[in-house]
Amino acid sequence: MACNENVIKNMSNEITRNCQSQNVVVDPDFVVYLIELLLLNPKYGGLFSKTINRNNLEYFVNECVTMLTSSETSINTLKMQYIMQTNYDKLQNLIDKHLESINHCLRPLVNEILDEDVDFEDEAAFKKLFRKISIYIILSSGLGNPGSIVTLKEGMASLESVFSLEDLKVFVALPRSEKLIQLNEIMQIASGVRLFNRDCKKGGEGIPDLPFIFVDAGKACLASLSNSLIAVMQRVNSLTTAIADSISIQDETGNVLIDIPSGSELTEDDYKDIFELLAFNRQYELFIRKLLSDVESMVENGDRCVEKVKLVLEELHSAVKYKAAVPVVTVFPLFTKLWEVWRSMQNVMYLMSTVNRLMSVLGNIQDQMKIPYKLLEKMLEGKHVVTDQDRMSSKVSITERLSMGSLKNYVGYNENFSINEKHVQFLGFCALCLSVGALVPSNMRVGLIKNNNTRYGFCSVKMAARFSREPQRYINEVLDFARNNPHVINLLNILPEVSSVRTIDQLVTKFYPKTRISDKDVQTETHPIDSYIEKNYSWNLWEWKRRACQWSSIVNCKTHSTQTHYSHLRSEVHCQTFQPRDKNMQTKKDSGVNTDPNKVFLWGLRGQIGYGQHALELNKMADSEKQKEIPQKISCPFSPRLLSHYNGNNPSCYTKLNHILHEGLNKLIIMTVFDALDIQHSIFRNKVVTSVLHF
């Protein structure tokens, strides 16, 4: 292959620069990890199989930049895998790397101590070397900071108690290899002395209380991992339930398809987005479970270390109690043992800090992921969320079990499976569902199918029966999907399998349903519609040929225009028009009518029987608010005395009253005067009344 390590590194640098030009910051080492996975696909690996072409290189770089700048779910899954792969390993390997890094940092100081050639008569040089050894012991043991004067003095005192200046002169004369061994022994003994002094409350400046810190750190780390696992499992169960029923298989061809419900607004791309989101959460779940398992073992190991520290300290106290001097052979091994147990606790604390740091990084990536809740609600409509435990242990009917017994290489379910027998390829996910990218857990009660000493699980009996017919076909489909989607390779732990087929261009052969062909005779009616008859219809084939020749000749003819006697008389006429305007017209008018009040008063209806009842017109009364009533003063032309001496035979009295009426005296008042004077003479009264009515 033309792509070696240097070429991949150069491509990584170019991809990183192109991403930075688009304001996207990526780690060059992560780009190398992505390139190595993409080259497993013949689509990209074939570009550099023989020689490196600039056009092919530019095409590959653009593809990588597009993937990195799109911020897809698969890229975040790859980032998690890269972080765990580069920062986490087996616990013992992590401890070895940590100790190696400490030794690497202290190597210049160690070389300076080992290569020191001191004159035996120069005491200042010996004291300087002694000080360097004390600094090395403090740094190597991790018991404080030598920059602190108190810590440095305490370290030098503990070193002097086990390693005097006379011993230092002997140390300088030793060969280099023996110097290194003795230096490590001195470091362990001096560190044990400092730990013992700390327990005796006689020192221990800068030494943390690891037993107490370890208990709190272990509880906090376990609680954080447990909460993260509960949250991710809720998302995983919802996403798995949404897609579990959408995978179907064709009976005729055996193709695995995404079955979209009829009448639904969902598309195939929506399901693929959910597949990638489920893969991300499954990868996050696997890492959380791995860290949780390791932390549990750390807590158990740390508890044992705490108990060992207590036992060693008790043994030391009993060895030096009430004694002014203790043999070196007795006490030095105890100091060394105390230091070794303390170093184990330091290693456990380092592992816990590593787990917390990784949890923080993975949590930041998890927070960047957004779940499309509206899309998920549409997929979960009418469904009940099922957990992995329920899905993997759902019951299988007796009929289905009997049908599975006839399958080739079938392994029935047994609760007494050993650890090796329980191992299922593809992390226990259904092999057929993986061919389209759906991570659906297998139902262990269905059983397993064995192929090439590898066991495969399935989510249903139908899937298992179909896989048993063509196992290699569906395995190749999973591998083909994995190399086209690199985030699945390390998720399913199938990197060796994908690498073995990297040179095969066409790994999967697509099958299509057969098209059924049959010969049938069809009789065409002459006139299928009775109400319509084609007048130009002819049954003669030669007639149709003649018409075709005629139509073809008409196409080649030209149309000419000719000026006639009447056409030249035509002229254009101009007329002016204007737009109609809107008019308003009132068609109805609202008005009110006020009826006239009664203006007639019937006089004499009450208490005046036989005295000439009659009708009188009433004057209009003015508005009380606008006009006040003006009383009329009426002067009677004849005195009461004259009226009292009235004589009915006296005509002058009648003449006088008649004259008053003609002068406009109020008629009603005249009648009132008659009533007041009680004029009883009927002849005179009738004359006056007649005159009043006449007036």
Image (cartoon, grey):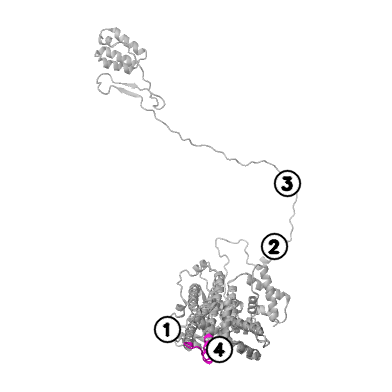
Decide which of tag 2 and tag 1 comes sooner along the chain.
Answer: 1
Q: Main secondary structure of the magenta part?
A: helix
Q: Which residue is mark 1?
A: 398
Disc 2 and disc 3: Cα gap in Å? Answer: 31 Å
Identify whether 266 is placed above or below 670: below
Q: Marks 4 and 2, how far apart in space?
A: 73 Å
x then y, percent, for residue 663: 37, 12
Measure how far apart labels 4 and 1 are at the Cα level: 28 Å
Q: Which mark is residue 157?
A: none
Amino acid found under the numbered disc labelled 2: Trp
Specify the amino acid type for callout 1: Ile
Nearer to us: label 2 or label 1: 1
Q: How many marks?
A: 4
Image quadrant where one finds the C terminus: top left
Q: For the magenta stretch, what is the residue range?
A: 320-339
- The answer to which of marks 3 and 1 sits earlier in the sequence is 1
Q: Residues within 10 Å of mark 1 (few under 14, many from 20)?
A: few
Q: Position of residue 127 (x, y in %)?
A: 63, 83
Q: Amino acid at mark 4?
A: Asn
Where is residue 218? Give x, y as percent: 49, 78
**Residue at image point 68% right, 78% down:** 8
Residue 584, how many percent across, how many down? Answer: 55, 38
Q: Earlier in the sequence, mark 4 or mark 3?
A: 4
Q: Residues within 10 Å of mark 2 (few under 14, many from 20)?
A: few
Q: How far is mark 2 from mark 1, CA to CA?
A: 76 Å
Instruction: Please give the label number shown on residue 567.
Output: 3
SS at mark 1 in the image: helix
Which mark is drawn over residue 551? 2
Q: Residues within 10 Å of mark 4 (few under 14, many from 20)?
A: few
In front: 27, or 571?
27
Label 3 sits on a secondary structure element that is helix
* Residue that badge 4 annotates: 452
